[in-house]
Image (cartoon, rainbow, N blue to C red):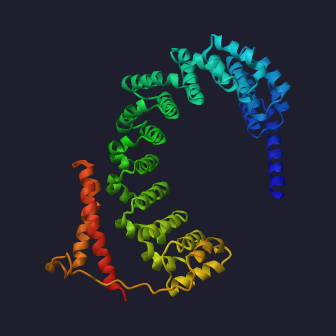
Amino acid sequence: MDDQLKRNKDKQEEIERCQNLIQSRNPRDRSYAAKRLGEIKARPDILMSLMADPNGFVRSAAAEALGRSVELPAPEVVSHLLAAIDDPNNYVCAAAVNSLGLLGATQALQQVEACLADEHPIIVQAAILAMARIDPDRIKDRLVDYLQSEEYLIHLAAARACGWLLHTPCSEFILQSLKELIHTSDQQDFKLPKLYIEVLARLNYKEAIPTLVDIAEREVGLRGVAVEALVEMNAEEAAAILSPLLSDPSNRLRRNLIEMMLQADYKAAMPLVRPLLKDSAITVRETALAAVSKWQDRVSVADVREIAYNDPNPFVRPQAVITLTKLLGQEALLDLVDLSEDLNLHVRRAVAGCLAEVDYLTPDGKMALLQLAQDPDTAEFARDALQAHDLDAIHPLPAKEANLTGPVPKYLRDDPQSLLQALEAWQDALPRLQKDFNLEELSEVDRALSTLIVYLRDALNGSEAP
């Protein structure tokens, strides 16, 4: 209740500040005040009074804000907006039409539809979008015609309306328009091609996938939105082509690419995804963890463990704890015990949940679980683990035995650590070789190296066990 009172008080103070600005002789101040009043949904009477302001920009701001300040029924607001359609300033008229659309004012349908024939593109633009909100069926069949308009604003509005209404008949025209724009424009303005790409993704127009892949590979300013569209369309065939872009400087692009690899289950990208566990971007590290977990990449255990213990972001560490458990299973128990006393509450909660995933508990594991179960902050998360373990079947964790005698040549047994370091260095260098080799070939080498590295690591860890 106190929070609500504070919000009400803050809103009232903001309204009072805006009322003071309305008295300003500077139209910029009055325009800003109108915009803010709409955003905080203040009483519409203040905004309606601004509809009589001598400055067109202020009237336009007030008309725009009215569409965001109320919900229907609001007959007086609709009446003021209808009157503003006849305003001599085109921007005021367009703002009023747009607000009628935002309100879904069906009683204004006839007047809004009449604006479709206006000679000013900004008014037609507003009318198209308003019609799409008020009565979609009445505008759908006209969208193809509006898409062919040479007026930029009209064309833009029609494309946006196609996306809103999922109007598939426009798909082919939008794709062709995108191709022409990419091939003929210097791409100083990305607004229109980005809109095309977003609309094609919403329409799930599969025929656009080759063009989107080409854009993602070649058009730097558009590759991010193209990859997002491909991810949204589940374009699995694009994963192999786009995998080299995992080294792109854009955090968002790298994250989206990993998501695409996951959707396509494109394990061949593992040599390129693995280094991203050390990426500077939090979202990229999180997505890389998801990939490592799904593809069961045991070579990544050391990096995942490092994240679980030391990552600077407190919310990435719990995900790493879960990933570590999925990779190691029972072998993760020692780490879970160590992390059960971590200062990060989210880590302790993750540990509590992961203890349910191990086959059995050692005495230390049992003690850690009981401590988590007694802690009010983690007790709920430990419940499944308590049910999973009857706590009578407690077994010691068997110590690993060093076993470098089988398939390891005798002359290499004296210095397995050097062999391991050489193999790890080879694997770490794979991402840098992607320009010179096929990714499938690199992936095959990566899998072979992973087998050897995991074997040697397990053996060395066993030899160091007490």
Picture coordinates of residue 147, whole percent (x, y): 52, 18
Quadrant containing the C terminus is bottom left
Picture coordinates of residue 317, whole percent (x, y): 51, 66
The quarter of the picture where residue 222 lies is: top left
Q: In terms of depth relative to the viewer, which is nearer, 47 or 375?
A: 375
Q: In terms of depth relative to the viewer, which is nearer, 456 or 255?
A: 456
Count of marks, rendered view: 0
The quarter of the picture where residue 183 lies is: top left
Residue situated furthest bottom in the rendering: 466
Picture coordinates of residue 240, whole percent (x, y): 33, 45
Quadrant containing the N terminus is bottom right
Q: Relative to 243, does residue 207 appear above or below in the rendering? A: above
Q: Relative to 362, does residue 4 appear above or below in the rendering? A: above
* Residue at the spot 21% in from the left edge and 81% down from the top edge: 405
Q: Left of 138 or right of it: where is 360? A: left
Q: In terms of depth relative to the viewer, which is nearer, 244 or 290?
A: 290
Residue 274 in view here: yes
Picture coordinates of residue 94, whole percent (x, y): 68, 21
The quarter of the picture where residue 71 lies is: top right
Residue 52 in view here: no
Q: Relative to 383, does residue 48 appear above or below in the rendering? A: above
